Amino acid sequence: MWFFLHTYQQVGYKNNEFWQWMKSHWDEKIIPSNIAMINILIFLLLWFEDWILDKVTYSSVAVVLFTLSFFWFGSVARYSSAKIKKPLVYTSRVKRLMVPFVTFSAFFPALFTYMSFTGFLPFLDLLLPNHFAGLLSFDLLMLLVGWGLGLAFIPFYILSSGLLTKPIETYIQNGFKNQARKKLASMPDLKVIAITGSYGKTSTKFMIRDLLKERYNVCSTPGSYNTPMGICKVINNDLQSNHQILILEMGARYEGNIQELCDIAKPDISVVTNVGVAHLETFGSQDVIAKEKGTLVDNLSDGDVAILNADDPRVSRMGADLPEINRILVGLEEGDVRGSNISYDTSGMEFDVEAGDEKERFQTKLLGAHNVQNLLLAVGVAKHFGIRLKTMALAAAKIEPIEHRLEMKQQGDLFVIDDAFNSNPVGAKNAVEILSQFNSGQRIIITPGMVELGDIEAEENRKFGSAIGKANLDLVVLVGEERAQPILEGIREHDTTAMNVRVVNNLFEANELVKKHARPGDVILYENDLPDVYNE
């Protein structure tokens, strides 16, 4: 029960995504062989009772089935991981979901338990008259039928409970949305900055916050709060009357998501990081993704500002047909704000920034050319607010990496690049390129590859593997045998005779393997750490 409830929470309480997960795990988790077999045996016994009871006694059959059921259902190993990275959180929504779920779950066991003791047969005697004509005062077989059905239908109970409680959740969420709108309407001088994009939203958000807070009182959403309820929670609970700027991250998994967020908080400044292949499975194409991200720019009014990635053609075109807004383009190749001359060392990286007639050398603890791009977007926003590059450079030097996003850590004699929350092709290849530039010891990568890329998932993982092979790393640990195959194909495109490539079942096995191979000075990259739902 808890396994399926945990999975439902991990897919964001989305009924369609939970249904897709159920279909992809049908034989393994939903109707595994033990549940299917016990129910088949019971119903065969019911239909062919006369023939079977000529051979053995009724009590013997019931005892055998009870014993088989005990051993088949006594183990829950298939529904549990050795360790869980993100456990089930008992939120108010989970508690509301439990009310219909418990009711549904108890129905068959309670009904059949009652019938097994009382002999009351409101409908089953019409279906299986032979068996029930001579029903005993206590029917163990009937008891097994009820509990077998109860176990078999648990994931369907969760799905049904989600559908049943959806109107309640919608009503509650609309209340939070209206509360947030009223609060924003009461603060007419507040400037709202909204950030979207396939990748880099959270990093860019925190960079904008860190540059602007040198001069302004800023409120921003924490972590990856980029859903309607996440945004409402911050507006309703954290936004204060003395705040001058509100920075919001806006995520999208389906068409219409950005407009839903803009209807809560209309942006004065829209920032678009890039258009990639994240959630391609739900959008269908990059052009559809670009249109959805562009909704953030379309919501700008006269005099509002769009800060756009000049190096991404789909992004740089956004708002070009809106002369009433101001567009600021930033990039490593061209734009109103430009970055160049990137260099790395174990403390981070340095690069030059040019904006108008200003030029400044930035030093930061961050890693990766994509982080330079993100920081340039933040510079574009801060420049609009009148902050000078020299002031920004001082602020940039204090920016800490976001947890699990190319975060450099030193653990004893080892250096760890924690990029566990990254799962996009561009960021993954950038991380491998960064790892390849270290020479303090062995260069080791642990990765399960990428997911939720739709039809291009295998191809993107092959390209990722090719980047790993090209980097000629010392130890490559791939997590998950099936997902590792396209990565291995990409690795084999290069001469990797000196590379040690290993495949393990899960992250915990990977860590144990690295412990045996690592030496002082080694650099270990953790690239993408999938939720527990993908490690099954």
Image (spheres, grey):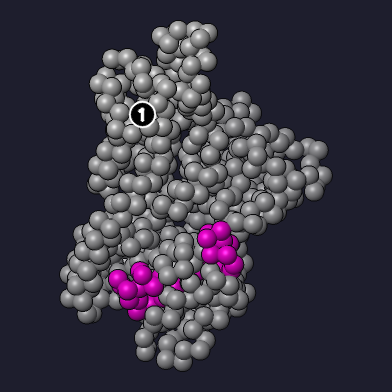
Q: Nearer the viewer, residue 152 or 482?
A: 152
- Relative vertical location of residue 434 with respect to residue 320 in this rendering, above or below: above
Q: How far from the left and from the top, in percent, is residue 226?
A: 38, 61
Quadrant in the picture for the N terminus: top left
SS at badge 1: helix
**Relative to 110, is 431 on the left or the right?**
right
Count residues near mark 1 (Cα–Cα under 10 Å), then give few for <14, some for 14-19, many for 20+: some
User: What is the span of residues highlighted in magenta in the rendered image?
Assistant: 258-286
Q: Nearer the viewer, residue 261 or 379?
A: 261
**Relative to 95, is 262 on the left or the right?**
right
Q: Residue at x 53, y 45 (%)?
A: 23
Based on the picture, tell me whether residue 226 belongs to the magenta stretch. no
Amino acid at pointer 1:
Asp
Quarter of the image where one finds residue 107 = top left
**Relative to 33, is 129 on the left or the right?**
left
From the image, tell me which residue sits under label 1. Answer: 125
Based on the picture, tell me whether residue 276 belongs to the magenta stretch. yes
Q: Nearer the viewer, residue 165 or 447?
A: 165
Q: Residue at x 25, y 46 (%)?
A: 96
Quarter of the image where one finds residue 259 = bottom left
Q: Residue at x 46, y 89 (%)?
A: 322
